[in-house]
Amino acid sequence: LEPKTPQYKTSDPNSFAHTSARSRWPIIITQGIDDVHRSIYATQDEEKVKEGKWIVSELAGLKYELQHDRELSPIPDDGGSDIADYNKELEALKPAKWHSVPWLYSECYLYRRISSIFNRTQNWKSYDIFARQKMSTFKSSRPAVIELASRYRDIVTELESKHTIKGAKTAEELEEAEKVLFMEMCEICLWGNATDLSLLTNLTYEDIQKLQGSEARKKSEKNILVNDLDKAFKILSAAQKQGKKERRVDIVLDNAGFELFVDLILAGYLLASGLATNIVIHPKSIPWFVSDVLPQDFAALIQALADPQGFYSALSDDSEESGTKTPPLSEAEVDALKYLFQHWSTCHAEGQLVMRPNTFWTAGGSFWRLPKTEPSLAEDLKESELVIFKGDLNYRKLTADAEWPATTPFTEAIGPLGPGSGIRVLALRTCKADVVVGLAEGEDERIKATEGGGGDSGSRKWAWSGKWAVVQFSDGKA
Ligand code: F6P
Ligand code: MG
């Protein structure tokens, strides 16, 4: 079920796990405490206030245990069916102290522990301590959101009314244009917040061609160390040509807000272009790694687009304090955003875009376990033409967060999800943790030698900041 290669641990001073456990996690808990305080002030309900204070004390206790390197304690029973597995694993890791425990398990445990606190209350069960953060970052990406929304409308209306992309005259040109747009959209999904919008500023075939050689595109592309997008496109395009009736693409989501927004842009494009007939998105079931998508984040995003003017003009908690207000949207901007709302809610209502939660995504182990522990989910994913795994944590889980040599083939590092799995995997990952595989010989050393790359410190520092990325594919065939 697990690779023989050892996993990264919080005791390794060369790993990002080390600072994560000592500096990052206490801050995350503190921010959570602040958030609960704000919600306590905002309520009149005495019972809720009382429970809120209990939550704060539990969170403070957790932070104390973490900072004083205590043993991880069994997660109290909150009715969740996943608790037994978490605790069984903890038993096997004993003595598991915060500062010397596998990184992947302990970080998952942290979020599961936090959610168990809320689950054991009456009034705070579905409360998300990270919701405020998620929405305010989405709000602040307004220019990019508007920009993408109007591009999207142009592309999708053209595809839907004329079944083409502006300027493409022949079937070959159309396919080429579709491929370029597919790669652009995937790259926008990849870079998420750090998106260079100049990537998608062109629509006509001639412009798209120019774009292929454009400086801007090249600039961020050189930070993609492995790029298998063309393989993924081939798969979707071949299935379309074969006339296969149902062609499904799955997206194992990562973060809410802008990243979810661009993931839905990709989803809508795949549907409008016919590269897919169905999209299944997989959210998390508990507040997870701060910003991950919960079902209610999807609903909140759609809601925001239904009334964009209201959304952007409402004072956020923070702007209320500073008294600032953003300028109103223009009519054209409102229209573009409402178009998105229309398109996405129609796709959703017609069953072309569905959300499928599963507690497997918030379990404490890696995806190496998927076929054994969640066979029905594995079977389901086999039905898909392509399963896109977004972000850093999903990549850590695919590779079991193990200390692979960087030249290990991706197909080997994903173990049971690799050859013979019947699941087509595409990982879109900006690197925010140590594990990296599938690099060419010498590449790791080359980047280590760049500024801030880690040099010969023994740390792969370059992989911690999100500046570099890998896009890796495995076709799942035996
Ligand atoms: O490296 C910091 C970190 O929080 C990791 O613990 C985690 O894998 C990742 O970032 C989360 O990032 P993403 O949202 O891309 O999965
Ligand atoms: Mg995340």
Image (cartoon, rainbow, N blue to C red):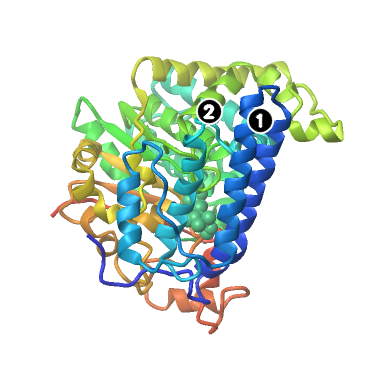
Horizontal arrangement in the rendering, residue 465 relative to residue 44 (left or right): left
The single residue placed furthest to the right in the displayed view is 323
Marks counted in the figure total 2
Nearer to me, 163 or 393: 393
What secondary structure is marked by label 1?
A: helix
User: Can you give x and y, in whole percent of width and height, for residue 211 in the image?
Assistant: 54, 45
Residue 20 in view of the camera = no
What secondary structure is marked by label 2?
A: helix
User: Can you give x and y, in whole percent of width and height, for residue 258 in the image?
Assistant: 57, 37
Task: Tell me the quarter of the picture where residue 358 sits.
Answer: top left
> Which image quarter holds the N terminus?
bottom left
Nearer to me, 439 or 436: 436
Which mark is first along the chain, 1 or 2? 1
Task: Tell me the quarter of the picture where residue 65 sits.
Answer: bottom right
Residue 385 in view of the camera = yes
Label 2 sits on residue: 152
The nearer-to-camera label among 2 and 1 is: 1
> Which image quarter holds the C terminus?
bottom left
Q: Is residue 208 above or below residue 167?
A: below
Query: What residue sits 64% from the left and 55% below the top?
Result: 27
Label 1 sits on residue: 49
Residue type at numbered disc 2: Tyr
Task: Tell me the quarter of the picture where residue 444 sits.
Answer: bottom left
Nearer to me, 190 or 150: 190
Query: What residue sits 86% from the left and 31% below the top?
Result: 323
Horizontal arrangement in the rendering, residue 77 relative to residue 143 (left or right): left
User: Can you give x and y, in whole percent of width and height, for residue 260 in the image?
Assistant: 51, 36
Q: Distance between the residues labelled 2 and 1?
A: 45 Å
Q: Is residue 383 above or below residue 20?
A: above
